[in-house]
Amino acid sequence: MDEAFLSGLRDLLQEQCRVPDLPEDWFWASAMLSAQGFEYGGDFFVSDLVETEDAAAGLAMVLVDVCGKGATALPGAVQFAGALRGLLVAVPCEELLDAANAFLLRQPSDESIATAVQVVVDLGTGRYAIRSAGHPPVLHWRADAEEWVVDNARGTALGVVDEPEFPVSEGVLAPGEALLFYTDGVVERPASDIDAGIDWLRAAAREAVGDEGMRAVPARIMEQVDRGDDDRALLVLARE
């Protein structure tokens, strides 16, 4: 693909990866790295403000890992990111992943597959709901225990079956706590299983919090991840 074309697609995707202004006691931080020496990749996130069940202000956010890597994943990522941004404002949060799955199933390519994790957070109470579509589990920083705890949300990857399942995991982010989202490129290693990678991430992220604070976690972790054959992304959403 032409370099100018790829640059344009990259800019479009980066424009999608933005978070609306949050209350003063909330913040986010992210880091992304493409596969091998590629400047372009297919991992991305979208977000928007939503209304929660009690009509309070909320934030909906989705981190996505599309099939493919590097420049080959970029066109599909841009198309899917645009669709997701539209769905965020067009359908109820509990129906978002089902609508995203239907969108991918309508695509002509057999490789229109993605994993994703969605979180909806009430910015007043800190209550959240997580839905996972074949994505690595979210980590929840527990301020009282000073430890990252593995969330139990599991589900079916997008674009695979007509009727996927997206069980919901619910919890509350207390002041001083955070959620850590990441794609599988962060935790997968050729010589070990993904559980070992998640254990490594929990330990590395705990050390990062202690040394430099929550805002530095994505960049600090990414510095320790080898540039391999997969794209990778990390995203922290925290309550101060």
Image: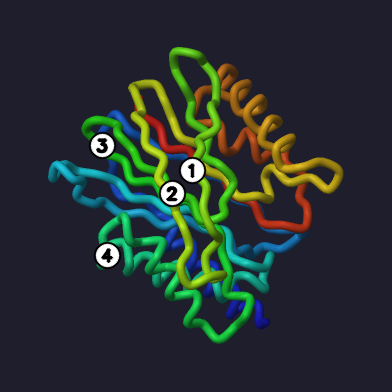
Which residue corresponds to mark 4?
91
Instruction: Name the residue nearer the viewer: 42 or 14.
Output: 42
Instruction: Name the residue nearer the viewer: 203 or 165.
Output: 165
Amino acid type shown at disc 3: Leu
Task: Return the mark for residue 123.
Answer: 3
Local crowd size for mark 2, using a 10 Å CA cut-off: few (<14), some (14–19), many (≥20): some
Percent x, y of residue 219: 59, 38
Q: Quadrant of the N terminus?
A: bottom right
Along the polypeptide, which appears first: circle 4 or circle 3? Answer: 4
Amino acid type shown at disc 1: Ala
Along the polypeptide, which appears first: circle 2 or circle 3? Answer: 3
> Marks 1 and 4, how far apart in space?
21 Å
Which residue corresponds to mark 1?
153
Q: Quadrant of the C terminus?
A: top left
Q: Which secondary structure, mark 1?
A: loop
Q: Which secondary structure, mark 2?
A: loop
> Marks 2 and 3, how far apart in space?
22 Å
Task: Return the mark for residue 167.
Answer: 2
Q: Residue placed farthest to the right in the image? A: 191
Q: Residue placed at 50% from the left, 14% from the top? A: 145
Amino acid type shown at disc 4: Val
Asked if the residue at tag 1 contacts the one at tag 2, i.e. Cβ–Cβ closer than 8 Å, the answer is yes
Along the polypeptide, which appears first: circle 2 or circle 4? Answer: 4
Instruction: Name the residue nearer the viewer: 165 or 117.
Output: 165
Along the polypeptide, which appears first: circle 1 or circle 3? Answer: 3
Local crowd size for mark 4, using a 10 Å CA cut-off: few (<14), some (14–19), many (≥20): few
Amino acid type shown at disc 2: Pro
Asked if the residue at tag 3 contacts the one at tag 1, i.e. Cβ–Cβ closer than 8 Å, the answer is no
Q: Which secondary structure, mark 4?
A: loop
Q: Is residue 132 above or below residue 4?
A: above
Along the polypeptide, which appears first: circle 2 or circle 1? Answer: 1
> Marks 1 and 3, how far apart in space?
21 Å
